[in-house]
Amino acid sequence: MTRQDSSEDYLEAILAIRSKRGFCRNVDIAERLDLSRPSVTKAVARLSNLSLVEVVDHDVRLTTAGERLAEETLAKHRFFERMLLDTGVDAEVASKEACRMEHCISADSFEKLSSHLKRTRMSAQ
């Protein structure tokens, strides 16, 4: 896993946690990603230096750029997970593999693939 992959996973986790609870702490991220709290603290500091998150009173918040990247990553994850599930892949396997797939496709390629499949589905109906 590259540093970019890891950053996207953190941002996606923060987005999900904040959506569910309204706030996000390092311990929440550690639990969700099954990582140590010191590892999360270091990663959050790196994301803060990249202006993707800000921490206010222990609440980890996405910046506009961080939220955009988190939402793009989540959209890719959901897209690939749905494709895998639709072909009969086990749900747990589909989620894990979608997580890997979301990191290895460029935004341009993802947009073209997504648009192509939407057009294909529409013309098949």
Image: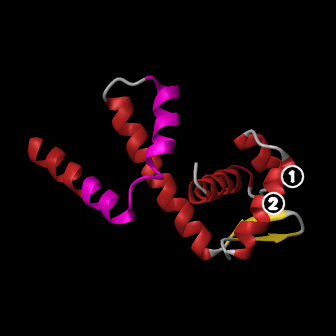
Q: Is residue 74 above or below residue 121?
A: below
- In the rendered image, residue 111, in percent from the top left (x then y), is placed at 31, 61
Badge 2 is on which residue? Answer: 42
Where are the magenta residues, as a range?
Answer: 90-114
Occupied quadrant, residue 66:
bottom right
- In the rendered image, residue 81, in percent from the top left (x then y), is placed at 43, 38
- Magenta region, mostly helix, strand or loop? helix
- Label 1: state its secondary structure: helix
Q: CA distance from mark 2 to mark 1?
A: 6 Å
> On residue 38, which mark appears?
1
Q: Amino acid at mark 1?
A: Pro
* Image position of 31 (left or right of 124): right
Q: Is residue 119 above or below residue 125?
A: below
Occupied quadrant, residue 90:
top left
Asked if marks 2 and 1 touch (Cβ < 8 Å), the reply is: yes
Residue 41, visible in the rendered structure: yes
